[in-house]
Image: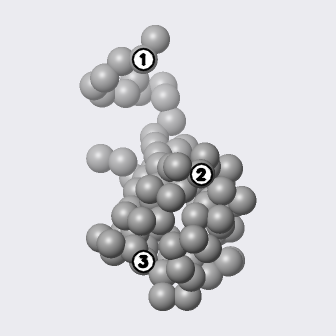
Amino acid sequence: TFTFGARKSEEPPFFKLSLFKSSRYDREEVTAILIKVMGLEEPRAQQVAKQAQTLGFAVVGEFVQEVAENYAASLKDIGLVVDVSPVA
């Protein structure tokens, strides 16, 4: 059952993966990278890439820490600028 509100203490903390505007890749390339590396569906990858390009950053998603850090490392290796931070 999905509920809103505070997470139960036995659940692991979640971390936000943010993507920042890329001067190295255009929007289409960022979209393709997000699909390949993270397995995002194309509409979501396009939305994230567009938001990062227009606003300067976009939240890609919220994950447990290990998953967020693994995605971040893979995206950084390709040359994208990302950040992992705890969900407040």
Mark 1 sits on what residue?
A: 2
CA separation in Å, label 2 and label 3: 18 Å
Residue at the top extreme of this rendering: 1
Front residue of 34 and 47: 47
Q: Residue 57: horizontal and vertical position, in percent? A: 36, 69
Look at the picture and state if 63 lies above or below 55.
above
* Residue displayed at 67% across by 50% down: 39
Q: Secondary structure at mark 2?
A: helix
Picture disc at residue 42:
2
User: In the figure, residue 69 lies in which quadrant?
Assistant: bottom right
For discs 2 and 3, the disc positioned in front in the rendered view = 2
For discs 3 and 1, the disc positioned in front in the rendered view = 3
Q: Residue 34: horizontal and vertical position, in percent? A: 61, 61
Q: Amino acid at mark 3?
A: Lys
- Would residue 34 appear left or right of 22 to someone viewing this image? right
* Residue displayed at 51% across by 49% down: 44
Q: Amino acid at mark 1?
A: Phe
CA separation in Å, label 2 and label 1: 25 Å
Q: Amino acid at mark 2?
A: Glu
State yes or no: discs 2 and 1 in contact (Cβ < 8 Å).
no
* Residue displayed at 39% across by 74% down: 53
- Would residue 20 appear left or right of 42 to someone viewing this image? left
Q: Secondary structure at mark 3?
A: loop
Look at the picture and state if 71 lies above or below 11.
below
